[in-house]
Amino acid sequence: MRGTLSKFLLGTAFLTCPCHLPIYLALLSGTVLGAYLWEHIGFSIFFITAYFFLSLGTGLWLWGRAAQGKKMDKTEMQEKALRWMA
């Protein structure tokens, strides 16, 4: 279950990466959703960025727990994140 949820969260983190917002606005131009995102661009940037970081962090955390099959303390989690980013 953790593996599936972590993959879902990491996939949605990829889709909601803030760098994709201009692409989404271009693809959704002429639609109601595109007009709403453009009209509320500040809210859109804030919400998409917040969801990106929350889903990325939670997805990586669950992925690490699912891979090890045990609970990690804060130090182990930080070390794993640093190894993954390097």
Image: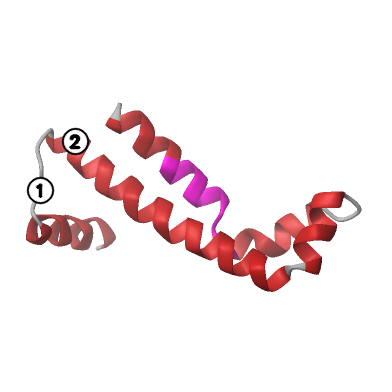
In this picture, which residue range is highlighted in magenta?
Answer: 9-18
The part of the image, by quadrant, that contains residue 82 is bottom left
For mark 1, what is the residue?
72
Decide: is 37 above or below 67.
below
Q: Nearer the viewer, residue 22 or 45?
A: 45
**Crowdedness of circle 2 by 10 Å Cα count: few (<14), some, many (20+)?**
few
Point out the frontmost of discs 2 and 1: 1
The structure residue drawn at horizontal position 30% and vertical position 26%, both measured from the top left corner, is 1
Amino acid type at image mark 2: Ala
Label pair 2/1, CB-CB below 8 angstroms: no
Q: Nearer the viewer, residue 58 or 68?
A: 58
- On the picture, is 43 further left or further right than 68? right
- By secondary structure, the bulk of the magenta-drawn segment is best described as helix
Q: Secondary structure at mark 1?
A: loop
Residue 64 coordinates in the image, percent (x, y): 21, 44
Amino acid type at image mark 1: Met
> What's the mark number on residue 37?
none
For mark 2, what is the residue?
67
Decide: is 63 above or below 77.
above
Q: For residue 65: magenta?
A: no
The structure residue drawn at horizontal position 72% and vertical position 70%, both measured from the top left corner, is 41
- On the picture, is 14 further left or further right than 26? left
The CA span between labels 2 and 1 is 11 Å
The part of the image, by quadrant, that contains residue 71 is top left
